[in-house]
Image (cartoon, rainbow, N blue to C red):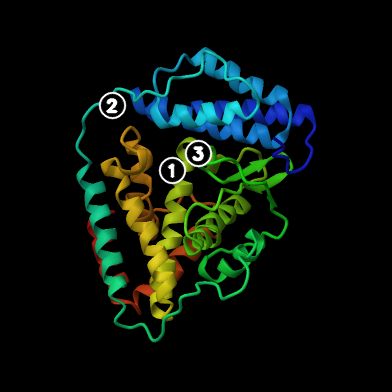
Amino acid sequence: MSVATAPVSSPAAVRWAHAAVAAALGVPATGSEQSVWAVRGLAETALGCLLLRVPEALWIVDDAVRDARFGPAGAAAARLRRVRALAGPVPPFYPEESEPAVPVRAVDADVAAAAAALRRYCAALGDLPGVRHDADELWGGGPAPSAHALLARGAVLRPSAYDHAGVRTSPAFPPGTAWRTWFRLPHGPVLVERPPVAPAPARAVWRAVHDGAHLDHLAALPPAAPAVAEYGAGLLTAEAYAMAVEIVAAAEAWWTGRAGLVRELCKGIAERAGRPSGDGGFGALPSLASAYVLGPLRLLGGADRTLPGRLGPDLRTRWRRVAALVPSAAELDRRMGALC
């Protein structure tokens, strides 16, 4: 199966794989969360190795998995094994797919409050009392837009939008292999296609707003590959930023009367709000799950020192502007004061 985006020299691919493996293993967590999170990161790294088409790069992932001696890692292990199987038989030392032993823990109070605040925000936007018109077609009629077209159309919704015309795209991977769909490889940023499982409007919003925000983030960082935003603590900031962009975009869409866009954005926000409770396979990943709910509220509230360049100031400017116009955004802004 060819998943190439562009040829990369073997030394460059090997250097990337070594750096990506180290970043995948260096997660800010302990116990079962550390293990499951590391396996998830190695699945992303293995996917990147397939994109590079350099077998020696994937061997580095094999070595890391063998040396780590991971215990059962549930869905993370299943995905790692599926990705590895695209290159041949899965080595016997890869982790088992059975569920890990996860300690029962209550969701932190501030995380639970942030999730509840986001649900209330989406419920208020969903009432749509100020919408002047609605549209079934989120991005207009005709054939499904390309990834580059969606990124360009979504630029107006992203506070620090860059031109991503030069971003490469990969062919679609089989179901159950791709999770993170944005990478910075030695030859530049790459978007990974997924099979069209979700409805077209949801896929369009995901690509135009969420993935677009991740690419904006990558573009604002130094050119090292992999980027700091792809793994570990950097990934926590990256997911918080992409979520914050979605929160702002939902209020802006409400104000401009784009009901279809509001609905799709709020579906995504509500789904992420359920992750701290274990939804979506995040039961073993409380730190990562909280990044999707408390993280964006902290960024919107001004705790953005980890964001590069203009990302933080641009985000806050857009949020303050829309919070002055949209009642539900103003209410969320008030709640953020108590949470952040």
Q: Name the residue under label 3.
A: 176
Q: Name the residue located 75 percent from the left edge and 31 percent from the top edge.
A: 12
Contact (Cβ within 8 Å) of mark 1 with mark 2: no
Judging depth in this view, the residue of 88 and 303 nearest the camera is 88
- How many badges with numbers are in the image? 3
Judging depth in this view, the residue of 314 and 21 nearest the camera is 21
The disc label shown at residue 102, or none: 2
SS at circle 2:
loop
Q: Name the residue located 53 percent from the left edge and 31 percent from the top edge.
A: 43
> Where is 50 relative to 130, above or below?
above
Q: Which amino acid does label 3 sit on?
A: Gly
Residue 332 visible at all: no
Residue 4 found in image quarter? top right
Circle nearer the N terminus (1, 3): 3
Circle nearer the N terminus (3, 2): 2
Q: Position of residue 253 (x, y in %)?
A: 43, 74
